[in-house]
Image (tube, rainbow, N blue to C red):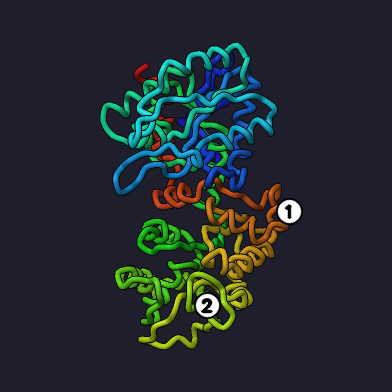
Amino acid sequence: MSVIDPRLPVIQNAPIEGKVVLVRFDHNVVKNGVIRDPYRIDRTLGTLYNIVERGGRPILMTHIGRPKDKKNGEIRCREEESVKPIVEYLERKLHIKFHIPEFHETPGLGITGIDTSINHAIRALKERRIGGIYLPNTRWFQAEEAEGENRQKLALQLAGLSDIFINDAFGSWQAHVSTYDITRFLPSFAGFLMQEEIMNLDYVLDPARPFTAVVAGSKYDTKIGPLYAIYNKADSLILGGVIYNTFLCAKYDIRINGVTGKEIEAAKELVEMDRKQGKIVELPYIVESDILEAKVEGRYRTIALKDLKKGQSYGYVLDIDRESFADKAVLESILNSNAIFVNAVMGFTPHFSEGSQALDETIDRNADAKKLYGGGDTLQEFKDLCPGLYLSVLDNAQYYFFTGGGTVLTAIEQGSPYGLKPIQALMDNGGKAVYK
């Protein structure tokens, strides 16, 4: 594992004793008011424990979901996107009391600011009558993702709550007020999870050889930048999902339902690139379905790539047949690798999942390789489809599960985690407030 860039200020060097510490986590694990999986919360407990053990008083914050309507820009503070389930989980786990402040919501605008009512809670926090404060969903705040003077106003209000800022939200790579602007006004440091994720990224950015990458996605055009970066870095590349469907359309001159002509045109560049370099290991058996809604007997079938006919149109290709992972070229690529990076769900879940299950089981057969999984859907599928395997490898040093798949792809595209805006802001801060 690599070492952290010495220019990045870290929590180990933060003067925490007796200070109120504002911490940004990525606890975006709530869906419809229920925690889907506490993994991302659990991974931050080390940072939280360190703050309290060293005499700090923590104020926590995270974003949850997408409260802002993309069409009209309105922000709605819905109960199902509240931090309450996270607080209840932490209280059960840590046996301490958290307080959630209530701020006035303006219809359509969300929370327009932090008012002085929070001062009572901060006093209780300092006097140890409560264990911590958990602010409302950061995306409920009108200025969190906005531009202009309101943005700086929110940053100043957040800074006014505390003495020190810790960013442990690796999965939140966008430059928002709670991850980026806040560093202008408080001494700022990287938490333990942030540091660990950065160091493990080195296994992907500077991998042991041979290096195999497995990448999938629901849209080709949104993954072009990271896909090309991974292609250039990998010795072998395995594709899945719509990305693979698009590649097949471009290479074999076929049409597959759900793949647009624009995406096929874009994929021709990758096809041409691979004709020269030959890195893409094709999964030879795909699963075609007549419908998206379910896996209905008689309405889906396995097709071999060798049987694809030029000019032919096919239905929805929704999975990879598990027999693909018994193919000699696919097996050799996976079993002979010294490093494997997976940011892929092979099938259209929840009905088509055999390809993802077979992928994970095949990768596990390579006991010696460093195996790195991206966050989000990739991790969720691993846990859902291979629960026994997942539990058995949680403490296996050869496995690492990132908490932010999008962050990993962005760092790969940029060639370094230190170009990510929130991390760059910490380095610019250097552990010292700039304006405060």
Image quarter (top left, top right, bottom left or bottom right) of the N terminus: top right
Residue 170 in view here: no
Q: Residue furthest front?
A: 107
Residue sitting at x 52%, y 16%: 122
Image position of 379 with respect to 122: above or below: below
Q: Residue furthest left?
A: 148
Image position of 189 with respect to 270: above or below: above
Residue 47: image location, x then y, percent: 60, 30
- Depth check, front residue: 329 or 23: 23
Residue sitting at x 58%, y 36%: 86
Residue position marked by numbered label 2 in the rendering: 286
Q: Mark 2 Cα within 10 Å, few/some/many (few <14, many 20+)?
A: many
Q: Residue type at mark 1?
A: Ser
Residue 249 in view here: yes
C-alpha span from label 2 to label 1: 29 Å
Residue sitting at x 67%, y 63%: 366
Q: What is the quadrant of residue 210 in the picture?
A: bottom right
Lower sequence index among marks 2 and 1: 2
Residue position marked by numbered label 1 in the rendering: 392
Residue sitting at x 62%, y 72%: 331
Residue 329: image location, x then y, percent: 57, 76
Q: Is residue 22 left or right of residue 184?
A: right
Q: Residue type at mark 2?
A: Ile
Image position of 40 with respect to 306: above or below: above
- Depth check, front residue: 259 or 297: 297
Q: What is the quadrant of residue 109 in the picture?
A: top left
Disc 1 on helix, strand or loop?
Answer: helix
Image quarter (top left, top right, bottom left or bottom right) of the C terminus: top left
Q: Is residue 339 left or right of residue 413?
A: right
- Depth check, front residue: 153 or 109: 109
Number of the label disc, if any, that sits on residue 152:
none
